[in-house]
Amino acid sequence: MRYSPMPVQLDTVRLTLRQWTESDIDAHRALVAERGGGMPSIEDNRRMIEDQRAASARTGIALLPVIRRDVGDFIGYCGLTVGRASVDEPEIAYELFQRVHGQGYATEAASAVLEAASATGRTWLWSTVRPWNLPSFRVLEKLGFQRDHISTDDSGELVWLTRPLP
């Protein structure tokens, strides 16, 4: 691999991002259900966690659960993924429970992930966001991402943003 692996634990002032565990299944199911598509089964969610672990071992990057340090609760995930991009230029992705929106957690977690991505030796990151997702655009703007182009897929328009890494 041309890149150093991303750390599997990142700590910020208020958050810990760490590897997926069995204890994350119920909270992650609730997070997915918050999207409006229904609650995934325990088995589907367990498979998703196993897929995340396998992808991380293969690529050296990871989506990590976000845990509030003071409370110890799972509030979402943040990290790097191949997604619509590549291992060389991965996507930063995050999703947090609506109840914690507006408290700076996404920006804090994504800032830690940016630092970790830079430490791997990567020089470029992408993010893709649906046009309606204004909170994600605000987070990405704070992190220095710039709009690059718009594409369309089965779910509609997708805005691509990019950011060079030091």
Image (cartoon, rainbow, N blue to C red):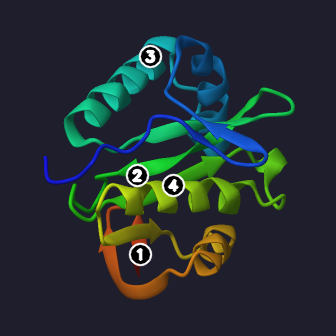
* Disc on the earlier residue, 4 or 3: 3
Q: Position of residue 161 (x, y in %)?
A: 43, 78
Q: Which residue is mark 1?
A: 157
Q: Amino acid at mark 3?
A: Arg
Q: Amino acid at mark 1?
A: Glu
Whether residues under marks 4 and 2 lie with C-beta atoms below 8 angstroms apart, the answer is yes
* Disc on the earlier residue, 3 or 2: 3
Q: Secondary structure at mark 3?
A: helix
* Residue 136 to residue 10: above or below: below
Q: Secondary structure at mark 2?
A: strand
Q: CA distance from mark 2 to mark 1?
A: 22 Å
Q: Which residue is mark 3?
A: 46
Q: Which residue is mark 2?
A: 80
Q: Nearer the viewer, residue 46 or 105?
A: 105
Q: Which residue is mark 4?
A: 113
Viewer-side label of 2, 1: 2
* Residue 143 to residue 101: above or below: below
Q: Residues within 10 Å of mark 1 (few under 14, many from 20)?
A: some
- Horizontal side, residue 55 vs residue 111: left or right: left
Quadrant housing the C terminus: bottom left
Q: Secondary structure at mark 1?
A: strand
Name the residue: 69% across, 69% down.
Answer: 135
